[in-house]
Amino acid sequence: MSQKIVQGRFPRRRLPEIDVRKANKEAVGRSTMRFVPIKSDDQLDLQSLHRVRERWVSRRTAVINQLRGLLLERGITVRKGRRYIEAALPGILEDADAKLSGALRLLLAQLKLELEQMAQRLEEADALIEQTARENEDCRRLVKVPGLGPVTATAVIAAIGNGPAFRKGREFAAWMGAVPREHSTGGKKNCSA
């Protein structure tokens, strides 16, 4: 039986430039349309700092997991958590009874060094974030809220600025995810904070 190429029922087409312009023109004319404010250079710098810091944190977690995995393959177990691997690793590297090969000891030492460098970078980033939180008036007000620290406060300021995108505090709370929890049962609505 010969194969036959069947065209899709609704072929995808690219929107011509004129259609995009029409859509933009209509969007501008609507009164309910909300626009995203342009970010300042300070906001962009702060947002970049948070993105790089997040990458460093995930990289540190990856290194810790790799260390635990390599040690577990050799029968050495270390509890989950950064402080446990940081406390146990020097003793493991110096222990002659651990029966670790020279190559593995070298790899573990290099991963330990990478972990220390990552910690140094994160300390510098956290110091810069704390300095920014102390200098910015909006950040100082946000830090006073229970549960919000300098990292969260500067991340919020980097994302929204001073908040002109929100008409009410309720919209901002919903954007952050700070909405009441619903505990409903049997048709009874019960919301609590």
Image (tube, grey):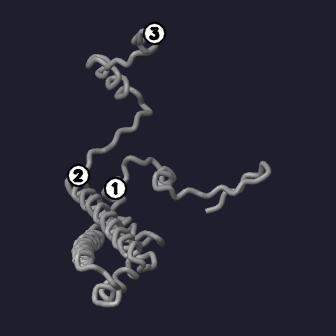
Frontmost residue, 103 versus 6:
103
Q: Examine the image and state in which quarter residue 131 appears.
A: bottom left
Residue linked to disc 3: 1
> Are the residues at dot 1 and dot 2 in contact (C-beta closer than 8 Å)?
no
Which residue corresponds to the image point at 34% horizontal and 42% vertical from the top-left? 36
Badge 1 or badge 2: first in the primary sequence: 2
Foreground: disc 1 or disc 2: 2
Q: Secondary structure at mark 1?
A: loop
How many numbered callouts?
A: 3
Q: Secondary structure at mark 3?
A: loop
Three-letter residue code for mark 2: Ser
Q: Residues within 10 Å of mark 1 (few under 14, many from 20)?
A: few
Q: Examine the image and state in which quarter residue 183 appears.
A: bottom right
Q: Residues within 10 Å of mark 2 (few under 14, many from 20)?
A: few
The answer to whether one can see residue 131 in this image is no
Residue linked to disc 2: 40
Badge 3 or badge 2: first in the primary sequence: 3
Q: Residues within 10 Å of mark 3 (few under 14, many from 20)?
A: few
The Cα atoms of the two marked residues, 1 and 3, are separated by 67 Å
- Quadrant of image for the C terminus: bottom right
Foreground: disc 1 or disc 3: 3
The Cα atoms of the two marked residues, 3 and 2, are separated by 64 Å
Q: Examine the image and state in which quarter residue 4 appears.
A: top left
| Residue 27 location (% of width, % of height) | 37, 27
Three-letter residue code for mark 3: Met
Foreground: disc 3 or disc 2: 3
Residue linked to disc 1: 162
Three-letter residue code for mark 1: Asn
The Cα atoms of the two marked residues, 1 and 2, are separated by 11 Å
Is 147 left, or right, of 106 in this rendering?
right
Frontmost residue, 79 versus 98:
98
> Are the residues at dot 3 and dot 2 in contact (C-beta closer than 8 Å)?
no
